[in-house]
């Protein structure tokens, strides 16, 4: 059975438009955390939730965007290089492709887990080839919360890639990852 898409065409188009936007202006609501090796990481505090939203702008000079997109989507490969993966799998429930991901945290912190949908589209926009990956939390009775593990219910990510015109890629990513107060232990 093939999984049904979980994101609208407009959501993919909106993510593509972000790639054309400049990085946040200094002194604005977004705070620059770090800028190194051509990559800038910004965060925005959401007072109501106590969470931060992150934006990343930059590029990788020696890595083509299609390879980056393939690596992002390859869960088996992630298990090889990411030492913090405790469990990571993809299943189809209710015609949706669901990912379960448990992340190991060091003592005394509790592990976190994510249940989310994601989708990749390779798009042609104004004559440019763009790779877009979208992900967001979901909840299903088939993936109940586990005792002692903190469920991240607010996970949202967009990753947009295109060629830098040479051998590398430029990218834009946004992530709204975690609950804060419960994430302390």
Image (cartoon, rainbow, N blue to C red):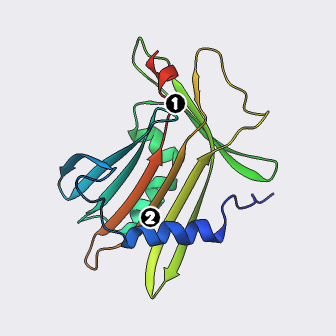
From this view, report whether residue 137 is shown above or below residue 135.
above
Q: Earlier in the sequence, mark 1 or mark 2?
A: 2
**Residue 85 coordinates in the image, percent (x, y):** 48, 32
- What crowding class fits label 1: few (fewer than 14 Cα within 10 Å), some (14-19), or many (20 or more)? some
| Residue sitting nearer the eye, 28 or 97 | 28
| Residue sitting nearer the eye, 41 or 81 | 41
Query: Which residue is identified by label 1?
Result: 179
Taking the spot 25% from the left edge, 78% from the top edge, the residue there is: 166
Instruction: For residue 131, say whether it is visible.
Output: no
- Image quarter of the N terminus: bottom right
Taking the spot 52% from the left edge, 45% from the top edge, the residue there is: 76
Taking the spot 28% from the left edge, 63% from the top edge, the residue there is: 59
Corner quadrant of residue 154: top right
Give the total of numbered labels: 2
Disc 1, disc 2: CB below 8 Å?
no
- What crowding class fits label 2: few (fewer than 14 Cα within 10 Å), some (14-19), or many (20 or more)? many
Would residue 29 appear left or right of 61 to someone viewing this image?
A: right
The secondary structure type at the circle numbered 2 is strand
Taking the spot 25% from the left edge, 54% from the top edge, the residue there is: 40
From this view, report whether residue 11 is shown above or below residue 40.
below
């Amino acid at each position: 059975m093939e999984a049904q898409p979980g994101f609208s065409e407009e959501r993919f188009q909106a993510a593509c438009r972000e790639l054309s936007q400049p990085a946040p202006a200094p002194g604005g609501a977004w705070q620059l955390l770090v800028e190194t090796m051509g990559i800038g990481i910004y965060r925005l505090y959401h007072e109501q939730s106590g969470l931060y939203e992150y934006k990343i702008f930059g590029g990788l000079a020696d890595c083509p965007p299609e390879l980056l997109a393939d690596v992002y989507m390859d869960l088996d490969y992630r298990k090889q290089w990411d030492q913090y993966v405790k469990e990571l799998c993809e299943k189809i429930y209710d015609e949706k492709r669901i990912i379960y991901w448990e992340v190991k945290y060091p003592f005394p912190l509790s592990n976190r887990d994510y249940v989310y949908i994601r989708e990749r589209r390779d798009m042609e926009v104004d004559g440019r080839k763009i790779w877009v990956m979208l992900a967001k939390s979901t909840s299903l009775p088939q993936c109940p919360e586990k005792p002692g593990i903190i469920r991240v219910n607010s996970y949202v990510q967009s990753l947009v890639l295109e060629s830098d015109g040479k051998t590398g890629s430029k990218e834009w990513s946004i992530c709204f990852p975690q609950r804060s107060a419960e994430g302390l232990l």
